[in-house]
Image (cartoon, rainbow, N blue to C red):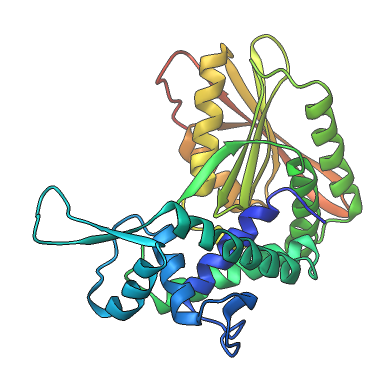
Amino acid sequence: MVTVGFEERVAAMRRFNRFYTQRIGVLQEGLLDSEFSLAEARVLYELAHRKNPLDPGYLSRIVRGFQRRGLVERRAPSTDRRRRQLSLTAAGRAAFAPLDKRSRAEIGALLETLPEPAQDRAVAAMQAIEGLLDATADPPEIVLRAHRPGDIGWVTARHGALYAKEYGFDASFEALVAEIGAAFINNFDPVREHCWIAERDGVPLGSVFLVGHSDTVGKLRLLLVEPSARGLGIGHRLVAECTGFARAAGYRTIELWTQSILVAARNIYTTAGFRLVKEEPHHSFGQDLIGEHWELALHGEGFRDVA
């Protein structure tokens, strides 16, 4: 089964394996049923993936063997002719390719035993371990991207699961999110509408939508940040992207509907300049709630209301 984001999960798990060597293949005489030992395959992998050349000092015997087989070559950098740097030859890359393919296949087979939400949790757990054990490492970058196939299903599922767990909402809330997502896809106007997915290493962490309501009014909908990613400023970034897009698209106002119990979201809206214009009690999603209508007036590029 291949799902959206699956290759990114495989890549994240392989990166973790590089950081924390696991037992897969370690006890085999030939790694991944190849002619190479674990140490030799490790060197091929590093040469194929690292950005900077590898210092050959402690690898001299392996390197000589690779050279005899025509897998690597030594070059002197232009800045220091006394040094030698190693890189793979075409034959070396050809030798590494089947190892790389088999490694991806093994990790993919392991991940495919899990449902997609469990795959995401596994990758997130590996990222947490990596961060704890290597405090000097830079954290993976969080990127915001446009939606692609599979994202609306993820947004719907995560809204349903998180709001049920955190606020006790029933399945009617998930149904509402599904309706909003379906309408967005069916009536999508890329000039005046957009969806942003926040992700890290291919794992989605949050979402927000801007949809058209009229020629002058856009609606901010379905803001979500995963619990594991809260406190990183993702919600503020998503709302900022949404408001910037709305200005560029020519809207004069952004509206949104939220609930008084969503304190973190309300703080994000206040910081972004939205103001509360109406509130009303209602019974929805199995709960007695106070619905809130918020607005942000877009008077021009760079304008920001004060709540």
Residue occupying the point 77% across, 60% down: 116
- Tell me if residue 201 comes above or below residue 181 in the rendering: below
Which residue, as the protein is rendered here, is positioned at the far front? 68
Residue 13 image position (x, y, % from top left): 59, 67
User: Which quarter of the image is occupied by the N terminus?
Assistant: bottom right
Residue 130 image position (x, y, % from top left): 47, 73
Which residue, as the protein is rendered here, is positioned at the far bottom? 27
- On the question of residue 63 being in view, the answer is yes
Choose between 226 and 127: the one closer to the eye: 127
- Tell me if residue 181 comes above or below residue 118 in the rendering: above
- On the question of residue 139 being in view, the answer is no
Count up the numbered dots: 0
Choose between 98 and 234: the one closer to the eye: 98
Residue 307 image position (x, y, % from top left): 48, 33
Which image quadrant for residue 222?
top right
Q: Is residue 236 left or right of residue 150?
A: left
Residue occupying the point 62% across, 54% down: 8
Residue occupying the point 66% across, 16% down: 217
Which image quadrant for residue 64?
bottom left
Q: Is residue 96 left or right of residue 86?
A: right
Choose between 285 and 121: the one closer to the eye: 121
Choose between 63 and 9: the one closer to the eye: 63
- Tell me if residue 256 comes above or below residue 20 in the rendering: above
Q: Is residue 115 left or right of residue 269?
A: right
Residue 55 image position (x, y, % from top left): 24, 68
Which image quadrant for residue 274?
top right
Residue occupying the point 58% across, 62% down: 100
